[in-house]
Amino acid sequence: MRGSLTAKGQATRGRIVQGAVAVLREKGVAVATLDDVLARTRTSKSQLFHYFPGGKDELLLAVAQFEADQVLDDQQPHLGCLDSWDAWYRWRDTVIARYEEQGDQCPLGSLFLQIGRNTPGARAIVIELLRQWQEHLATGIRAMQTAGHVPISLDADRTAAALLAGIQGGVSILLSTGRSSHLHAALDEGIMALRNAASAAI
Amino acid sequence: MRGSLTAKGQATRGRIVQGAVAVLREKGVAVATLDDVLARTRTSKSQLFHYFPGGKDELLLAVAQFEADQVLDDQQPHLGCLDSWDAWYRWRDTVIARYEEQGDQCPLGSLFLQIGRNTPGARAIVIELLRQWQEHLATGIRAMQTAGHVPISLDADRTAAALLAGIQGGVSILLSTGRSSHLHAALDEGIMALRNAASAAI
DNA sequence: GCAAAATTGGACTTGCAGGTCCATTTTTTG
DNA sequence: CAAAAAATGGACCTGCAAGTCCAATTTTGC
């Protein structure tokens, strides 16, 4: 078999990615080196370049994909069933808890500055993550509309986009300042906008 | 005079900062080097380290401070007189224009990932920028309350915080995806929240 | 005008991190 | 079991960018 990975190979490759994820979360992408990853995973240079011929960039991209998947997973199952006010508030609590716990690490954000937003691979990962995230929110808003809790006149996609922007900004402010008050405000105001739309329906 | 700068010295120091600003905007902090700055400003290594004994970190910090000041300046005079719906929309247009023009450069954001958010100097710059920005917004909201356009019951600081988060997120999404729709949505929804609060007043 | 201080040029050093290479061992395949 | 392919260890190379050093020049203060 040409170019295939044995079970052992897959295991090693996986270990490298996992190790890279850990190292990057601990030290930050700016200072983390390949040797750090090797030390942690007890693998050698030749192994790393064997599984990631593209070198550091390719490894970072793999880590980015992993982290991106993690973002939505961590919001489940709540993100998937935003069909009552209660569900929305439970989801809000999950988001806040996740990012408060994460502290001032930003696995994903910093990763993209390093890889470069321009590289097609990196950009595709962010775009897809944001698209899915926003889609989930929009679906939740439509569910609330169907249930009659939010007026149909509301533009679900636009509202979802604004809410997503608020979350992104809240998180990035949390990263910069260590305070989660903006994330709190963005989520609460976002949900409040849905409730107010209900009473201020045109 | 010990440790003082002559007029010539100040000019050189200023040229270095200006050159660094330009280089960082063009190439991005991840790949820009001190030699790039020297080449552009026609200065020498010894000059750079003479005026920035702390080396690259100190220079980056100076650039960060410059860029931070720029952020609010670029929103003036609109940000300073948010006392009518019209003024709010003019300000919104200014913000959108500024960041659309900037494209996918993020002088400030990327800078902090390089310097490290932890270093006290860097963190202080962001915190102060955000504080002033939010203060301006809150002042604007209070002006609208005083004028009777927005109910007093609204928490100006919290609303300003949410709006600021939305802007931050909108910008960071613009940087990642090249699309300004989220920034648009965040601003419009943020202002809409003020208007809806008016009609949905408790 | 002259001594002291500030400014400047640019060659040189240094350390490090990414990447290459090849010999050796292990696993797969038939 | 034997040949081929995959996996592994780790020494080595290389380039680059930050930072050092010193000698030369200009400016300042008195």
Image (cartoon, coloured by chain):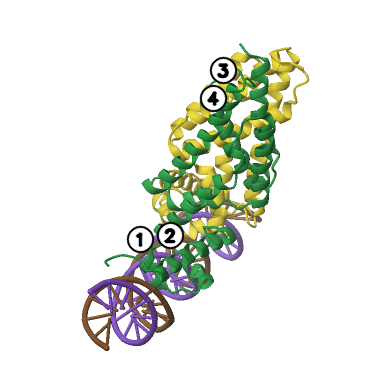
Chain colours: A yellow, B green, C brown, D purple
Which residue shows up at 52% across the image and 65% down it?
A: B19
The residue type indicated by label 3 comes to: Ile
At which x and y percent is residue B149? Answer: 64, 21
Write down the quadrant of residue B168 in the picture.
Answer: top right
Number of disc labels: 4
Residue wearing tag 1: B54
Q: Quadrant of the C terminus of chain A?
A: top right
| Same-chain status of marks 3 and 1 | yes
Residue indicated by mark 3: B152
| Mark earlier in primary sequence (3, 1) | 1
Q: Position of residue B53 (x, y in %)?
A: 34, 63
Please state which of the two labelled residues, at mark 3 or mark 1, is closer to the viewer: 3
Chain letter of mark 3 equals: B
Residue behind mark 4: B156
Residue A136 visible somewhere in the drawing:
no
> What residue sits right under mark 2 in the picture?
B59
Residue type pointed to by label 1: Gly
**Pointer 1 chain:** B
Residue under the point 69% across and 42% down: B180
Residue A54 or B20: which is nearer the viewer? B20
Q: Residues within 10 Å of mark 4 (few under 14, many from 20)?
A: many
Which amino acid is tagged 4? Ala
Q: Visible in this render: residue B39?
A: yes
Label 3 or label 2, whichever comes before in sequence order: 2
Q: CA distance from mark 3 to mark 2?
A: 45 Å
Task: Name the foreground residue: B157 vs A91.
Answer: B157
Work out whether mark 1 precedes mark 2 in sequence or the reverse, and give the earlier one.
1
Task: Name the residue located 69 percent from the left edge and 28 percent from the top edge.
Answer: A159
Q: Nearer the viewer, mark 3 or mark 2?
A: 3
Give x and y (percent) for residue B20. 50, 62
